[in-house]
Image (spheres, helix red, strand yellow):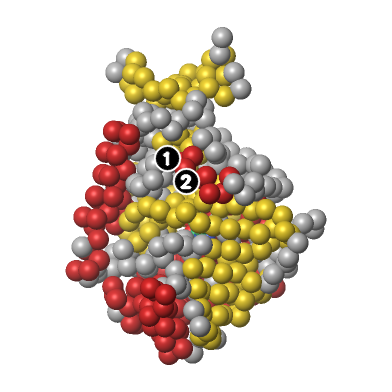
């Protein structure tokens, strides 16, 4: 069994150099997941210098761990948006998803991107308790003339798709790199953004990028201000497995919240795989990762991994300007394939001062209703729960090869793996939460804001600016 995503099965992708000098650019895009790369693609023909940087390898963030369905049947999402912000926003969200799907299809055809893009039928199932909600969702979809039908306990849509997310990103990048105004850097982590006069000074190690405009496409922004995302969102984590099967079904399915099970198929040149997602929970809950993965371990999958996405109070993403010339695209509520592409479409218009019909609905600075504002204390409580619960429970017995201790006033833990002792700091450098050891993927995970570190303590993802490395020694 490989504790990694099926999309990382074949090492795909070109390697890009890291930044080795100070540079100036018109636009800096921070993050090379589906969001950052889609924004880059949409703006590639603008007469301006555009630089995209990624702290790791392009596409290897949350995007590389998704199930990569391209779908507008996203659970009971339209009724939720209607209840929080009204029917017009719900309809606009639906229309934006359809437009993003058509756009992906057009791009793939136009650019001849080979990314295992396939049309599939999608099923949205509900159990007895959720049937009424499912019917309401169907009525909304029908009202907007969606191509869906209602059956005993499910909605069926036949105009949905799946693809290989990394092959798609790779295709977009190869188009962009034909342009002389575009530069891409990997292993280049921005740690601070300061606005001085009218430009942004973005520090990455010993080098600096000076940019007129900046887009934060880094999933969870590493600067708390000006947007203060932790109050506005919480994070959901899910577990995914892929195993070989004989059946290549041209379908996907998903069940409604809270017991979400999601399924799709993928076939490469050699085998067909069934991909199943389950066990979703807010990251502040269920800290025992061994237990969280246990359901899947019994199936002996070939690939097993977890992934986290940012959930907003009103189920609408944040795409737009958060401060003059500073833009954000995040909060995709686990539907980032469409919303990452949509971010490119919306931000392209905003960055060239053109109107976009969806922009007001996705505006991060949109006015919040009382119902949404009521979620804010809940978000804070959830973050605090992750923090407190883990401080109390961190030494519990579920860990097999982890020992916790204090040294020089620091909280530390040692994991022993193949005779090597890896000692790390167990306090997340972001906001001080105590980290959880994920024994399956061998990562230290933050139960508050989803920063993750490898077994040695090197930063992998999330808002933490620093790593948690302490020492590595051979076990005697
Ligand atoms: C379990 C699960 C299943 C999902 N399945 C689906 C699905 O079927 N369909 C769907 O539409 N969506 C799905 N999603 C949602 C989707 O995967 C995400 O919303 C989407 O991938 C987010 O893309 P992104 O580009 O914003 O983030 P990322 O892919 O994480 O990209 C952000 C990039 O920014 C880089 N970065 C971070 N910080 C810095 C920094 N300081 N400096 C430089 N670079 C930085 C990272 O290295 C990373 O490469 C799923 C999510 C989960 C959790």
In the figure, is residue 39 to the left or right of 168?
A: left
Question: Quadrant of the image for the C terminus?
Answer: top right
User: Does any atom of ligand 1 lie closer than 8 Å to the CB of label 1?
Assistant: no
Label 2 CA crowd tier, 10 Å (few <14, some 14–19, many 20+) = many
User: Does any atom of ligand 1 lie closer than 8 Å to the CB of label 2?
Assistant: no
Mark 2 sits on what residue?
A: 292
- Residue plotted at (37% across, 68% down): 316
| Residue 241, position as x, y percentages in the image | 60, 52
Are dots 1 and 2 in contact, CB under 8 Å?
yes
Residue found farthest to the top: 476
Q: Is residue 115 in sight in this rendering?
A: no
Q: Which structural element holds mark 1?
A: loop
Mark 1 sits on what residue?
A: 288
In the figure, is residue 234 to the left or right of 169?
A: left
Q: Which structural element holds mark 2?
A: helix
Q: Is residue 84 in sight in this rendering?
A: yes
């Amino acid at each position: 069994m490989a504790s990694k995503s099926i999309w990382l099965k074949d090492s795909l992708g070109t390697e890009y150099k890291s930044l080795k000098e100070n540079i100036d650019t018109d636009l800096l895009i921070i993050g090379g997941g589906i969001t950052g790369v889609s924004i880059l693609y949409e703006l590639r023909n603008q007469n301006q210098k555009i630089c995209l940087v990624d702290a790791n390898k392009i596409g290897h963030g949350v995007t590389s761990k998704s199930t990569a369905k391209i779908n507008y049947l996203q659970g009971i999402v339209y009724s939720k948006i209607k209840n929080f912000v009204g029917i017009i926003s719900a309809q606009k969200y639906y229309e934006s998803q359809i437009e993003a799907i058509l756009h992906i299809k057009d791009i793939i055809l136009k650019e001849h991107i080979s990314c295992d893009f396939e049309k599939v039928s999608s099923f949205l199932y509900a159990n007895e308790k959720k049937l009424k909600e499912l019917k309401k969702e169907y009525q909304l979809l029908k009202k907007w003339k969606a191509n869906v039908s209602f059956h005993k306990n499910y909605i069926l849509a036949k105009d949905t798709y799946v693809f290989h997310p990394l092959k798609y990103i790779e295709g977009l990048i190869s188009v962009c790199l034909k342009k002389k105004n575009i530069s891409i850097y990997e292993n280049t982590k921005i740690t601070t953004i300061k606005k001085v006069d009218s430009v942004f000074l973005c520090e990455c190690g010993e080098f600096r990028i000076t940019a007129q405009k900046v887009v934060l496409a880094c999933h969870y922004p590493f600067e708390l201000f000006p947007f203060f995302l932790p109050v506005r969102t919480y994070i959901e984590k899910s577990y995914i497995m892929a195993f070989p099967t004989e059946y290549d079904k041209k379908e996907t399915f998903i069940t409604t919240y809270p017991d979400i099970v999601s399924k799709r198929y993928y076939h490469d040149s050699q085998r067909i795989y069934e991909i199943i997602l389950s066990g979703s929970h807010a990251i502040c809950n269920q800290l025992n990762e061994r237990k969280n993965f246990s359901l899947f371990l019994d199936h002996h999958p070939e690939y097993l991994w977890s992934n986290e996405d940012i959930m907003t109070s009103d189920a609408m993403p944040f795409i737009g300007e958060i401060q003059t010339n500073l833009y954000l695209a995040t909060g995709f509520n686990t539907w980032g394939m469409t919303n990452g592409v949509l971010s490119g479409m919306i931000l392209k218009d905003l960055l060239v001062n053109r109107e976009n019909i969806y922009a007001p609905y996705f505006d991060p600075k949109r006015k919040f209703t009382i119902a949404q504002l009521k979620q804010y204390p809940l978000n804070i409580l959830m973050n605090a729960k992750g923090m407190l619960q883990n401080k109390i429970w961190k030494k519990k017995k579920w860990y097999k090869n982890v020992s916790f201790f204090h040294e020089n006033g620091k909280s530390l833990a040692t994991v022993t793996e193949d005779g090597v002792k890896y000692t790390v700091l167990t306090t997340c450098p972001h906001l001080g939460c105590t980290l959880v050891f994920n024994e399956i993927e061998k990562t230290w995970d933050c139960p508050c804001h989803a920063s993750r570190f490898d077994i040695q303590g090197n930063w992998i993802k999330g808002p933490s600016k620093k790593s948690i490395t302490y020492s590595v020694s051979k076990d005697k």
